[in-house]
Image (spheres, rainbow, N blue to C red):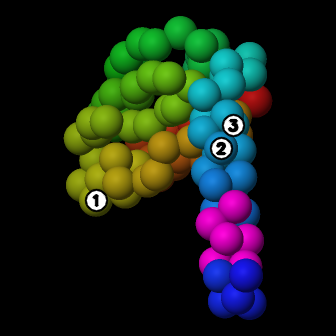
């Protein structure tokens, strides 16, 4: 076999293995976890990531609608002026982060 053909087969094999591993990772059941919602610096609520739901958090300054679906958490609607929280990427147990709405003093994070 030619060297270029061997290299091509090796690259194809490596790419196939990477694809299979990624498929397995994303198809595994989600680990238990909780989404913690803070309002004005205090824990407002805690939600299981395995239960799909939509929650509306009302504060003195407005509202935020939070969606938990397939282990992911995101803010889908808010009446704040900038809407930064709505445009923030979703978070999950595997990809933790923080979603913040400064005008409403709301923070969402994964426990």
For the residue labelled by badge 1, is the local secondary structure a helix, a strand or a loop? loop
Q: Residue at point 43% right, 53% down?
A: 88
Frontmost residue, 7 versus 90: 7
For the residue labelled by badge 3, is the local secondary structure a helix, a strand or a loop? helix
Frontmost residue, 16 versus 108: 16
> Viewer-nearest of labels 3 and 1?
3
Residue 17 vertical placement versus 28 (above, below): below
Q: Which residues are magenta?
A: 6-13
Q: Residue at point 69% right, 37% down?
A: 25
Query: Mark 1 — residue?
Result: 82
Query: Mark 2 — residue?
Result: 20
- Do callouts 2 and 3 mark residues in contact (Cβ within 8 Å)? no
Frontmost residue, 65 versus 14: 14
Residue 52 appears at what percent x and percent y? 46, 13
Residue 71 appears at what percent x and percent y? 57, 25
Q: Residues within 10 Å of mark 3 (few under 14, many from 20)?
A: few
> Viewer-nearest of labels 2 and 3?
2
Q: Residue furthest bottom?
A: 3
Whether residue 8 appears in magenta in the rendering, the answer is yes
Whether residue 56 appears in magenta in the rendering, the answer is no
| Inter-mark Cα distance, 2 to 3 | 9 Å
Query: Mark 3 — residue?
Result: 25
Q: Residues within 10 Å of mark 1 (few under 14, many from 20)?
A: few
Q: Quadrant of residue 36?
A: top right
Q: Residues within 10 Å of mark 2 (few under 14, many from 20)?
A: few
- Do callouts 3 and 1 mark residues in contact (Cβ within 8 Å)? no
Q: Is residue 29 visible?
A: yes
């Amino acid at each position: 076999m030619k060297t270029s053909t061997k290299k091509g087969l090796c690259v194809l094999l490596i790419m196939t293995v990477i694809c299979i591993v990624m498929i397995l990772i994303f198809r595994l059941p989600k680990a238990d976890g909780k989404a913690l919602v803070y309002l004005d610096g205090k824990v407002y609520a805690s939600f299981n990531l395995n239960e799909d739901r939509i929650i509306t958090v009302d504060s003195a300054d407005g509202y935020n609608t939070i969606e938990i679906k397939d282990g992911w958490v995101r803010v889908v609607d808010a009446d704040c002026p900038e809407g930064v929280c709505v445009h923030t990427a979703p978070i999950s147990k595997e990809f933790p982060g923080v979603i913040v709405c400064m005008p409403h003093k709301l923070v969402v994070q994964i426990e």
